[in-house]
Image (cartoon, helix red, strand yellow):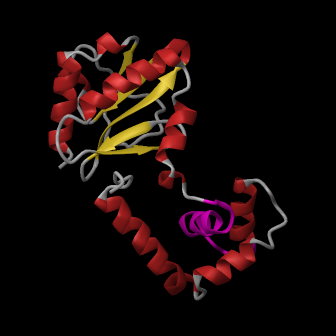
Amino acid sequence: MPEPNLTPRQQRYFEAMRASLERDTGRPLAEWVAIAKTCPETAPRARLKWLKDNYGLLQNHGTQVLNEAFAPKRPWEEPEALLAALWVDPASTAIFQAVDAAARKPDAVIRTVRKSYTAWSREFQFAAARPVKDGKVMLGLAAAPGASSRLEPPRNESWSERLKARTLLSAPADVDAEIEALLRQAWERAG
């Protein structure tokens, strides 16, 4: 059986979005897809704006329609392709692999991959990592910045607002017993 790529909470969210589209707009998804395919725009943001300006379709439903109309697969359905595209630098990949191994030690961990970062969740996200310059990795944790002298408050991160601290990792060895303990603490809070 393939590894789950969405938490149960995320799965419920997407099911609710699909169910609410027709109720909220009066049109089924198939009709919205047909409308989206008439859009003269080619860029995703321009298509989303076109749907909003011409049909009043807002961000979440618009994204749902555009994904159905133009994406051959939803990004989370191809996690290995997203991982390969995100973790291309050998140095950051080695650090990511160490973080991934440590983050997945507890049971019931779901790893999800976004375009710019990889996240680990239970019911809620408890950690995320993204590659940064010079082969380093920024690790975000659902922990207080004061939990370790290695942590600082996040600045302009695109991951979950639940991740209240971050640390820069420069080598796989930086994923030591302290980072493993912080990951475990964050995991415990995410259940």
The residue lying toward the viewer, choosing from 185 and 59, is 185
Q: Quadrant of the N terminus?
A: bottom left
Q: Can residue 165 be spotted in the picture?
A: no
Residue in the image at 36% along x and 60% along y: 10
Where residue 183 appears, x then y in whole percent?
22, 30
The residue lying toward the viewer, choosing from 88 and 118, is 88
Residue in the image at 70% along x and 54% along y: 45
The residue range painted magenta reads: 54-72
In terms of image quadrants, where is residue 14?
Answer: bottom left
Where residue 110 appears, x then y in whole percent?
30, 47
Q: Is residue 99 above or below residue 53?
A: above
Where residue 88 appears, x then y in whole percent?
56, 25
Q: Is residue 67 above or below residue 3?
A: below
The residue lying toward the viewer, choosing from 112 and 16, is 112
Residue in the image at 70% along x and 55% along y: 44
Report if residue 55 lies within the magenta region: yes
Q: Is residue 138 above or below residue 119?
A: above
The prevailing secondary structure element of the residues shown in magenta is helix
Q: Residue furthest right?
A: 40
How many numbered tags mark residues here? 0
Q: Seen in the image, is 107 located left or right of residue 11? A: left
Where residue 105 appears, x then y in whole percent?
20, 34
In terms of image quadrants, where is residue 41?
Answer: bottom right
